[in-house]
Image: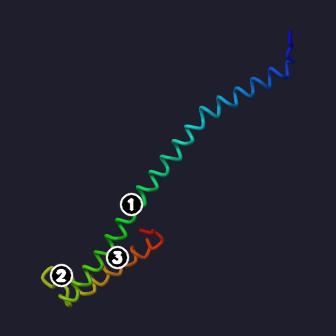
Amino acid sequence: MVTTSRSDKVWRILLYAYIIGVLAVGPLIGYIVWKNHQLAQQTHRALCSLKHGYADQAASSRRFLKKHPDGIPSLQVSRADLKRSILSLDKRTHDLKDVNC
């Protein structure tokens, strides 16, 4: 008959607890990492959409300003208003320069 000491039983229990812990926590950590990756991709797509939208609006406003150098007097939109809008759009585009699309 083989007898095991009390410390062997404690180590065996600790080993089983460790294995069960790894098997239980491992998938949870994997799921959390996967969800974070999904969220990062979604955020990146949204930022790219904003960046391209701002750039397109600025380009469109520049074309409009070339055709209508005085703005739209009937709507009380001056050249300065359009220029401010373009500068604001350019700043927003520049603020997103680190987003690689």
- Residue depicted at x 80% and y 20%: 9
* Contact between labelled residues 1 and 3, with CB atoms less than 8 Å apart: no
Q: Is residue 78 above or below residue 55?
A: below
Q: Is residue 83 left or right of residue 21?
A: left
> Element under label 2?
loop
Q: CA distance from mark 3 to mark 1?
A: 19 Å
Residue lying at 41% horizontally and 68% vertically, measured from the top left: 101
The residue singled out by tag 2 in the image is 76
Examine the rendered structure and indicate whether residue 34 appears above or below residue 73: above
State how far apart marks 2 and 1 are (Cα).
36 Å
- Is residue 24 or residue 72 the one in the foreground? 24
Residue drawn at (25%, 80%), measured in percent from left and top? 61
The amino acid beneath tag 3 is Leu
Disc 1: CA contacts within 10 A as few (<14), some (14-19) or many (>=20): some
Would residue 29 appear left or right of 88 to someone viewing this image? right
**Of discs 3 and 1, which sits in the foreground?**
1
Which residue ends up furthest to the left in the rendered image? 74
Which secondary structure lies at badge 1?
Answer: helix
Point out the tag, 2 or 1, that comes first from the N-terminus.
Answer: 1
Which kind of residue does numbered mark 1 sit on?
Answer: Arg
Residue 33 image offset from top left, x and y in percent = 53, 47
Q: Kindly check if marks 2 and 1 are in contact, taking CB atoms under 8 A apart as contact.
A: no
- Earlier residue among tags 3 and 2: 2
Q: Amino acid at mark 2?
A: Gln
Location of residue 95 (image quadrant): bottom left
Quadrant the N terminus occupies: top right
Residue sitting at the far front: 1
**Quarter occupied by residue 58:** bottom left
Residue that badge 3 annotates: 89
For numbered disc 3, what is the local secondary structure? helix
Which residue position holds label 1?
45
Which mark's residue is nearer the viewer, 3 or 2? 3
